[in-house]
Image (cartoon, rainbow, N blue to C red):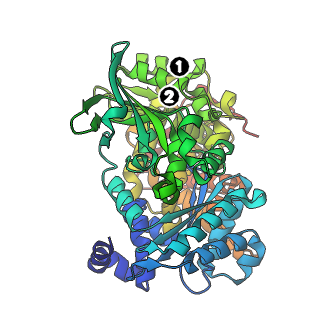
Amino acid sequence: MLPQIQSEIASDPFYQQNFANDGERFVAWYLRRVLLRDSIQTRDDITDGQNDKQMDAVIIDDEDRRILVIQGKFLTSVKVDAEPLREVLAAWIRLQDLPSLQQDCNEKLKLKLEAVRRALEDDYRVEFELLTTGTLTDAAKADLKVFADRLEDFAEFSADLQLVDSEVLETRLAEAEAQELPSLNHTITVDPQRTLLTEIGGAKTVLTILPLAECLRLPGITDGRLFRKNVRQSLGATNKVNKALRTTINGERVREFFYYHNGITAICNATQYDAEKGTISTKGLSVVNGCQSLSTIYSASERVRSPEAKDANILFRVYEIPDRALADRISINTNSQTAVKPRDLRSNDKIMVGLKRAYEARFADGFFMTKRGEDRPAAKVARKTVDAAVLAKMLMAWHCQRPNISYNEKKLFDEYYKTLFNTGYDPTSILVLQSWLNAIDDAWPNLALNNVLKAGRSYVKFHMLFSVSSIIASVNKQPTQVVEPSATLKAAQSPGDILPLAANCLENALQNALNQAQMSGKIFSPQNWLKTNGSVQGETLVAGTVASMLAGFPNGKALLDLMRVPATAMSNRWSAE
């Protein structure tokens, strides 16, 4: 991996122009090439430099509700000692006292720590990654296990620690480069003496006893693509069940792992067992039960590869299930060891099913995804495809007028579920909301937003959606009311001149908040501001000003006509407090 990284860093002006040394460039390369962060996000994530307190990059991942802290060691030597591990441990200790840390760290990290504080209040899990181009010495491997256990078992501030060395880097890079592929194809090496091919209920079935080490070769574990048809994703190493799994793997009875575990269940579109070669070839592979186990096995990869775990095995089932409905039932009914998250529990809720049925009945070429990781059928139009999780965020931003809550999927599908979802909701409004979001995504590269806002695209776009609704409400002289999305269909079909106005609202509201913070001598975190009611109030105020000025614009009359709606299309906002 080292020659490839060196070559790409040297040949790409982005790394040379934006980062001061090869250490920063290495971390930036990892963010872009492996974690698939864009150039703006990468520059925002990097905190390396003087007084970085052993935190080279910090990512607040609102989608997965995690804080990722990366410590990078770009070394030309093959072996890495325990010193970088001690630096990670030092960073973990410092994070437990944010006020003290914020006093003596660099300016970029100070801003990040404000976002970290808010994320910790929202119970985000903490993950550390030691990123290196080398491999650990035997002594360092022993320290890695001790440090990882210490971080996980500390009740007051638990965290995960993952080593990302050359071998893991190579695997993750391959996964990142293949992420746009429609499905995972993989060949599993098995022992024919421990493998059975049969047919159950018309489905080809392969049962095998698989060494834990072979599990490490499965693609899509780190980015979750292997579990795209699972009703839930990894719950992290600090989850009670995952802790127990890890204890067994690291304990004296690791060889008995097979007897303690119910096994892994995978489905695929097609499978071929070759007893002579000892392989199971799969197309469209997805693990529907075993996400927690495989994630934990992967996080304990050094132990799994050790001589002590040589005879540790797990039962592995592969079903050839081209029928999507049956695959969904298998996914749901095989997940019983750990409580499913609210978003997953709602996937088969009668309200959700009713919304899906109504939307697809109204729009024959539309598709409503209720389950995480569903694939859109080829016959359905991409721009008419709506994900239930995204719809929840749009409804919160538009009808509740609280885009600052849209980032929190846990709350949306728990305490706000009954507020947001009802079977009587107009399918046309669903489509119009999706149309606005499509338009925001299309216009994103050209919107006049500063880099701080562009770096937070995953949640900033819902503030954009809110600003659109606020401008339209103000144009109709009902600034405290909410317009029905379906009434804005015409505007959504011609959003070209409206979205720059929405971007102006957000940009000016942010600048006003920044100025106020500077006048009072406070540290201002844009990420935190976007998660407060202050951002809503700021955008609403600017939206009213923009609407009042439209008549004087060269195209003002056309814009006003485009955004006018009947009085009956206005209603009270849905309560979200």
In the image, residue 547 lies at what x, y percent? 56, 50
**Badge 1 element:** helix
Figure label count: 2
Q: Residue 353 bears which disc, if any?
A: 1
Front-most of residues 156 and 81:
81
| Residue occupying image coordinates x 63% and y 80% | 53
Q: Which quarter shows the N terminus?
A: bottom left
- Circle on res. 56: none
Three-letter code, disc 1:
Val
- Which mark is on residue 370? 2
- Left/right placement of residue 546 relative to residue 209 reads right
Q: Is residue 318 left or right of residue 111?
A: left
Of the pair 419 and 106, the residue shown nearer to us: 106
* Residue contact between numbered discs 2 and 1, judged by CB atoms under 8 Å: yes
The amino acid type, in three-letter code, at marker 2 is Thr
Q: Position of residue 168 (x, y in %)?
A: 41, 61
**Residue 570 in view here:** yes
